[in-house]
Image (cartoon, rainbow, N blue to C red):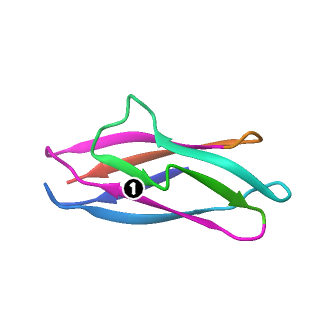
Amino acid sequence: GTIEVKSNLGQQYTTELKVRNEFMGFADFRAAFTSDSNPSFSVEPAEGSLSAKEDTEFIIRFRPQSPGTSEGSLVIETEDFKKTWRVIGST
C-alpha cells in the first residue's frame, strides 16, 4: 500500500499504522525503512511481537529537512510474512 504524509519544513508529522499477525499466535517482527529511504522518515517500534488477536500500532514520523517530495519504503517483517508500504512525504 501507499501512505501519504505532509508536513512543514522542520516540523514533525505523525501517523499510525495498525498491523496484525495474519497467522496463529504471536510472531516476532522487525520494522524499518529501507536504506534507500529518505532519512526524514522513522518508525516505532522497530521490533517486538505481533499478535493474531489484536493490532500492533506503529508510529510513522516524517520530519522534512528540505522542500519537495520525499519517498521511503517501510518494511514490517516476521518469519512468516513481509509487508512493504511506499511512504510519500511532501512539504
Image location (x, y in percent) of residue 80:
77, 41
Q: Element under label 1?
A: strand
Query: Is 84 in front, or is 56?
Result: 56
As drawn, is 57 to the left or to the right of 10? right
* Residue at 42% in and 47% down: 87
Is 64 a magenta residue? yes
Image location (x, y in percent) of residue 8:
16, 60
Quick one: quadrant of the C terminus?
bottom left
Magenta extent? 53-77
Query: Is 10 in front, or is 44?
Result: 44
* Residue at 23% in and 60% down: 7
Toward the top, the furthest residue is 36
Up/down of 65 relative to 36, above or below: below
Which residue is identified by label 1? 4
Toward the bottom, the furthest residue is 54
Image location (x, y in percent) of residue 70:
28, 42
Query: Is 72 in front, or is 60?
Result: 60
Query: Hey, what amino acid is under mark 1?
Result: Glu
Query: Is 86 in front, or is 60?
Result: 60
**Magenta: predominant secondary structure element?**
strand
Toward the right, the furthest residue is 24
As drawn, is 2 to the left or to the right of 24? left
Locate residue 25: give its quadrant: bottom right
As drawn, is 36 to the left or to the right of 1? left
